[in-house]
Image (tube, rainbow, N blue to C red):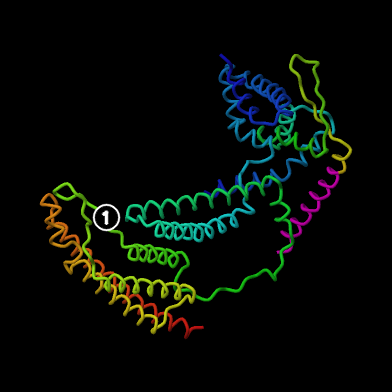
Amino acid sequence: MTSLTDRYLYAVTRRLPMDVRDDVSRELRTTIEDTIDARSTDAPREIAERQTLIALGDPERLADEYRGGPRHLIGPVVYPHYVRLLKLLLLIVPPIAGVLAGLGLAVEGEVTVGRVITGVGGAMLTAALQAAFWCTLGFAIAERTGAVDEWANRPWDPDLLEEEPGPRQVGWGDGVFEICLLLVLLVLLVVGHNPLVPAADGTQVPLFGPVPAGLRAGLAIVVAAALVLAVWILVRGRWSYPLAVVNLVLNVAFAAGAWWLLLGGSLITDDTRSAIGGTVPWDSVDLALRVTAAVIVVISVWDTGSGFVKAHQAQTLVRND
Amino acid sequence: MNDEVLTGLQQELRRGTVVLACLALLARPQYGYALQETLAAAGFAVDGNTLYPLLRRLEKQGLVTSEWNTDDTRPRKFYVISAAGRDTLHGLRAEWRALDTAITSLEGAR
């Protein structure tokens, strides 16, 4: 059984570079033994050994001192820049990946809500992880190769100072997220996937009945228009009263269309219901449809109101410029 | 609470001057533990985990040289100040005196 000193020396030196390991071990061993001898005059040897090692402290930190400072992957000088770039990448890259995945699914044709979520979600998650990994790796390499030290020592120039940006009402993160949601909704409406469900007699029947073609096209146009509005407001940065009015019109149209679609009776027709049979709790399904329609109306109302409030706030911002 | 702040700041002060103290003592060859004892006896208490890595850093910077001595049963590494170290000690002593003068005059000019 090795002594405490042996184990301490191992802990200190095992992560030191090969060329100094033996030298440090030899010197430190002698120093520890000298210290124990001095303390042993008024304490038994085991206790003196323990006191000595405690006074020397955590072997990892002592090893850090021998090495010349604690190690880090990305140092304090460049860390804020790393975080900023990472945030920027995570805002831009996953939405783009999600949109591309969504379009790919739409082109493919076989679109279900489940596949949209897993496909788009999976693409966004993968893209986010990739962006984070390569960004971190790049900075770590720059830190290791000393490129960071060179960059840190460059003289600071007041010309680098940026102007303070004007006040934005719509953050880029929120805006992009909303645009992606609208895009997904648009894809779903345009593709109009109709899942096949098992009927009572063993065949497969389409779940949704023939929706009035005008209704689907109309809803798609409204969502497309909402998409354009969202992009416009994101780029512009501020609301205005005319934009709030457009938002109102689109919200009314969407809520009305959704209401008609969900509760008009043509979504899941009586024929389809009898074909599928009585095992499905149709009352609950109807309740769910009504609740969904109500929620859509509530959200539309809230969104319209929010648009007008922001338009009003934008006016005060303009006056304060 | 004030005690902690004071102790911390005193440690900072000592951390800044431990190199000066070491170089001053290393006019004659010394080894790790004995050096720590001598410093403590002179009123300059330094932790081992600060002092021993510091000696190696000074050697890397060329301010001291080291030599292994195997006369005793225990091998000992002796450090002694080098020529470059003497120049540096000179400079540090001058800085120390200048600081002392500056602080004294600051206190005087109230």
- Residue A16's place in the image compared with B71, above or below, is below
Q: Amino acid at mark 1?
A: Pro
Image x and y of residue A28, in percent? 69, 25
| Vertical order, A311 against B25 (above or below) | below
Q: Main secondary structure of the magenta part?
A: helix
**Going by the image, does A101 lie left or right of A33?**
left
Q: Is residue A126 left or right of residue B28?
A: left
Q: Chain of mark 1?
A: A
Q: Nearer the viewer, residue A9 or A144?
A: A144
Residue at position x 60%, y 24% in the image: A8
Q: Quadrant of the N terminus of chain A?
A: top right
**Picture quarter containing residue A34?**
top right
Specify whether A37 is left or right of A281. Answer: right
x and y percentages locating residue B6 in the rendered image: 60, 48
Residue tagged 1: A195
**Residue A304 belongs to the span the image colors magenta:** no
Q: Tell me the quarter of the picture where residue B28 sits.
A: top right
Q: Position of residue A194 (x, y in %)?
A: 27, 58
Q: Is A137 left, or right, of A310 in this rendering?
A: right
- Region of the chain picked out in magenta, as a range: B88-110
Between residue B101 and residue A238, name the one nearer to us. Answer: A238
| B2 vs A167: above or below | above
Q: Residue at x 39, y 84 (%)?
A: A242
Point 55% across, 74% down: residue = A165
- Asked whether B99 falls inside the magenta stretch, the response is yes
Q: Which of these two is toward me, A290 or A101?
A: A101
Could you tell me which secondary element the residue under label 1 belongs to? loop
Q: Residues within 10 Å of mark 1 (few under 14, many from 20)?
A: some
